[in-house]
């Protein structure tokens, strides 16, 4: 046991509440400080919680409330913009015990984890935006924008891709990298689809990428990735109206096979667009008293379908390391050694797929020729072979003590 008694968890998104619950399970008190005044919003987006994420939540006894908010998604069919079926793969590999991946609204996952943590007596303070963190004798002090502060033995930064904790740990840390894509998503009603509920359909269109899945109630959940080589200025996308987005998207998908334009037109709510960022390899994840996990440390592109699941895995493993090793520094070192190879491999794979989505000019022409040949081989290899088991079947053994790094 690291002697850690009180942990300041910064960020109440996905990694934050999961870390607080895992720490509580390890016998360590944690308080969550969230910048937003209410439970963090999910900006309307939805995500897939892969089987490895479900497994990690199961370790915390928190999988059922989360998955109850979504629907099982098991298959992923890829199409070219001309309507050619490129291949089908498991979205997230159904495990031998029947565990599947789920699709759920990001805000619903936030709420489920928040409610679980609060229900276990974990303190979650809202309206606490961290502005600085400093080491003090035997611990760390967090300073918030409202002028208050808090003191703990260690601080865990779960504050997402635009993390404030990250530069506090390493002032030279690289900034998040723009992936050349704008993401939008929505929910369409009243469109009759031939597709089975729980199957994703992904279309590599001529000008942009489109994906959708039919929910059990018939609502169609869709998203679009629009190539945009120049990174939009922060906040600039909010000035584009829903009408303008609908017109632009309809133009981009005109001529592609599939229901993209119909679904976009049948969406009755406002559309929110966001640039896609990833977090490239970070040389430093921790000091002796502070560490970052989740998107703050290693954000894969949404393409991977793994960001939330990796954040939950991080949370569970970090708590286990703190439970088992004598000092926070040793726990952090062991955690990093165990996590880096896995998360960096997933970030790299997702970046490769992103490049295909964002391809323009000659690269796009090459992609369109190669995709029908390579993709079926790739999806079979990743989803149904050894790499798939490694990715989706990953399980943290909570009961076995963590050895020190290098042991
Ligand atoms: C459009 C989109 C689609 C995605 N699709 C998928 C998918 O299909 N599957 C998947 O697994 N992942 C997906 N992701 C990624 C996934 O949402 C993230 O990987 C996941 O949310 C990371 O969790 P986190 O807790 O590390 O960060 P976040 O969920 O971003 O939470 C960070 C929290 O910290 C708070 N915060 C920020 N700064 C401060 C501060 N200074 N002080 C206090 N609090 C602060 C924020 O308000 C927020 O609540 C998608 C992401 C996007 C944008």
Image: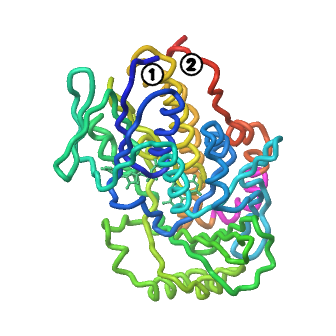
Residue 127 x, y percent position in the rendering: 29, 56
Q: Which residues are magenta?
A: 366-379
Q: Secondary structure at mark 2?
A: loop
Residue at x-position 58% and y-position 70%: 223
Image vertical order of residue 195 relative to residue 306, above or below: below
Residue 308 x, y percent position in the rendering: 55, 49
Residue at x-position 51% and y-position 39%: 21
Q: Please tell me which residue lies in front, 70 or 116.
A: 116
Residue 180 x, y percent position in the rendering: 45, 62
Q: Could you say which disc has been placed on residue 402 in the image?
A: 2
Image vertical order of residue 39 relative to residue 222, above or below: above
Q: Is residue 370 magenta?
A: yes
Q: Which numbered disc flags the more N-terminal residue, 1 or 2?
A: 1
**Seen in the image, is 382 located left or right of residue 318?**
right
User: Dot 1 surroundings within 10 Å: few (below 14), some, or many (20 or more)?
Assistant: many
Residue under label 1: 331
* Dot 1 and dot 2 residues touching (CB under 8 Å): yes
Q: How is the image coloured?
A: rainbow
Picture quarter containing residue 81? bottom right
Q: Secondary structure at mark 1?
A: helix
Q: Is mark 2 within 8 Å of ligand 1?
A: no
Residue 288 x, y percent position in the rendering: 33, 23
């Amino acid at each position: 046991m690291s002697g850690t008694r009180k942990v300041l968890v910064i960020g109440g998104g996905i990694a934050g509440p999961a870390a607080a619950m895992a720490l509580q399970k390890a016998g360590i008190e944690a308080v969550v400080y969230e910048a937003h005044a209410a439970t963090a919003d999910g900006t309307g987006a939805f995500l897939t919680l892969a089987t490895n994420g479900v497994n990690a939540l199961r370790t915390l006894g928190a999988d059922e409330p989360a998955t109850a908010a979504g629907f099982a998604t098991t298959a992923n069919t890829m199409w070219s913009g001309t309507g050619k079926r490129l291949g089908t793969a498991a979205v997230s590999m159904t495990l031998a015990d029947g565990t599947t991946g789920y699709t759920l609204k990001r805000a619903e996952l936030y709420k489920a984890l928040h409610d679980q943590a609060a229900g276990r007596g974990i303190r979650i303070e809202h309206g606490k935006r961290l502005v600085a963190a400093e080491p003090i004798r035997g611990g760390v002090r967090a300073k918030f924008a409202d002028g208050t502060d808090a003191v703990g033995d260690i601080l865990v930064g779960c504050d997402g891709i635009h993390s404030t904790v990250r530069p506090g740990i390493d002032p030279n840390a690289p900034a998040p990298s723009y992936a050349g894509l704008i993401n939008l998503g929505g929910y369409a009603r009243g469109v009759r689809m031939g597709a089975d509920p729980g199957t994703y359909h992904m279309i590599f269109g001529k000008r942009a990428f489109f994906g959708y899945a039919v929910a059990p109630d018939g609502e169609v959940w869709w998203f679009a990735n629009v190539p945009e080589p120049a990174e939009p200025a922060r906040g600039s996308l909010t000035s584009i109206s829903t009408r303008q987005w609908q017109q632009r998207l309809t133009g981009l998908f005109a001529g592609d096979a599939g229901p993209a334009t119909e679904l976009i037109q049948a969406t009755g709510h406002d559309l929110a667009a966001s640039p896609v960022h990833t977090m490239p390899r970070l040389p430093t994840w921790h000091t002796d008293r502070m560490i970052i996990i989740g998107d703050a440390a290693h954000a894969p592109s949404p393409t991977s379908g793994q960001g939330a699941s990796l954040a939950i895995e991080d949370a569970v493993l970090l708590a286990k390391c703190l439970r088992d090793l004598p000092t926070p520094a040793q726990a952090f070192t062991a955690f990093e050694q165990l996590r880096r190879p896995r998360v960096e491999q997933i970030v790299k794979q997702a970046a490769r797929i992103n490049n295909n989505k964002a391809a323009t000019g000659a690269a796009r022409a090459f992609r369109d020729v190669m995709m029908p040949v390579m993709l079926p081989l790739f999806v079979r290899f990743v989803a149904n072979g050894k790499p798939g088991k490694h990715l989706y079947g990953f399980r943290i053994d909570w009961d076995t003590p963590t050895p020190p790094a290098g042991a």
